[in-house]
Image (cartoon, rainbow, N blue to C red):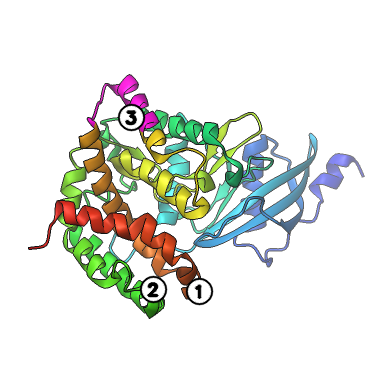
Amino acid sequence: MTAQENLMHATPLPEQHPWPFTSSELTAGLRRHTGDPTLRVLNIEERPVPQRRPSVGRIRGVHVAARGSSGAYTFHLVLKEPQQSGITLAGSIGPAMREAAFYRTLAGHLPVRTPQVYAMHPEGEWLLLECLEDGLQPESWGAAEFLRSVEQIQVLHDCFWGLGDDLKVYNWLGRPLDANLDVHQRVAERATERLLTVAPDEIQDTPVPWKPLFSRLVAHTAEISAALHTMPDTLLHGDYWPGNIHMDTAGRLTVYDWQRVSIGPGILDVISLVQTSRWWFQKLPVDADVLERHYRQGVAQSSGQVWTDEEWRTLWGYGLLWVFLTHWLSILGNTPAPLLKTQAPLLQELWLQPLAHWLDVFFPEV
């Protein structure tokens, strides 16, 4: 029997295996990637994922051996199975479907590198992406790497600066500032209830009491949204920080985890970079003020948009309130009680005290 005949008679993967995709779906994706119509999958194994961090959903490494007319192939992939796909209870497109739509229609038009997609479920129930290896661990980032990440997100924002209305042609993109504010309030209220139930009582009262703070925050959802609407819209990553950025040994960045991609003011991505990095790493190798200034300088040079220091600090305050309201309340509500207790001092310093300050500035109580 010839090599070609051996190839054509290779035994396909059984359809019953511990993967959400079928062998035909995997094979079709690999054939598209290689351009080899004779490729057949020979073996698939689960492998550890490098630089893996806690995530919502399931992440697995996948090692695939295959053969085609061009010879043997080996693929190192990441299988992502988000927790939520399809349409949410609020009637909006869920994060998994949004990420699938992003890779299918928009990723190729960005000025930033994104992971290659080998195969995916139409509604994002699973995605097979390239496994990014041999990168610089986020904990090892220095000032240069953080500044490089600021430049990268500024380039993305500049590409779509002021094009919020044009981006609406992608109807799957998140539009949080344009969404029904009642929905935001209901989601925030449910997240608050969950967080107050999960968190130990002894960390909820000092130095900034949680319940009245969260109630004030939710009550001012509309005003916070209106203030941020004064900034030009652009394309947002939505969860931009080193944990979602791969930096290779040559300093090239690949940005992944696009479940929260949306339309909104660019300052929200900068806030995510600073606050999430501080949550994970506490002490950054460069001051947040330096990162903010670097972003503002890039925006001024590329778009001509300039803010005074006072204007920027005001927008930063509103942005902090919004990011916590629409994202971090849910994150904390899904955080185990022991971790909340351990992180309570940092939570007060990083979020609760600044939130209380800005609520007093913008919405002083009589």
Q: How many marks?
A: 3
Three-letter code, disc 2: Ile
Tell us which disc is closer to us: 1 or 2: 2
Residue position for label 2:
203
Q: In which quarter of the image is residue 287?
A: top left
Cα distance, mark 3 to mark 1? 38 Å
Precedes in sequence: disc 3 or disc 2: 2
Cα distance, mark 3 to mark 2? 37 Å
Please tell me which residue lies in front, 208 or 234: 208
Residue position for label 1:
338
Q: In this view, does 46 lie above or below 106?
A: below
Q: In which quarter of the image is residue 183?
A: bottom left
Q: Does the magenta stretch include residue 242?
A: no
The magenta stretch is 293-308
Cα distance, mark 1 to mark 2? 11 Å
Three-letter code, disc 1: Pro
Please tell me which residue lies in front, 209 or 273: 209
The answer to whether any part of residue 248 appears in the image is yes
Q: Is the magenta stretch mostly helix, strand or loop?
A: helix
Q: Is residue 285 above or below residue 188?
A: above
Residue position for label 3:
296
Q: Does the magenta stretch include residue 303?
A: yes
| Location of residue 225 in the rendering, given as x and y in whole percent from the top left corner | 20, 50
| Residue extending furthest toward the front | 207
| Residue extending furthest toward the left | 366
Three-letter code, disc 3: Arg
Tell me what residue is drawn at x 56 percent, y 37 percent.
Answer: 142
Tell me what residue is drawn at x 38 percent, y 78 percent.
Answer: 202
User: Circle 2: is it few (<14), some (14-19), or many (20+) Cα within 10 Å?
Assistant: some
User: Circle 1: is it few (<14), some (14-19), or many (20+) Cα within 10 Å?
Assistant: few
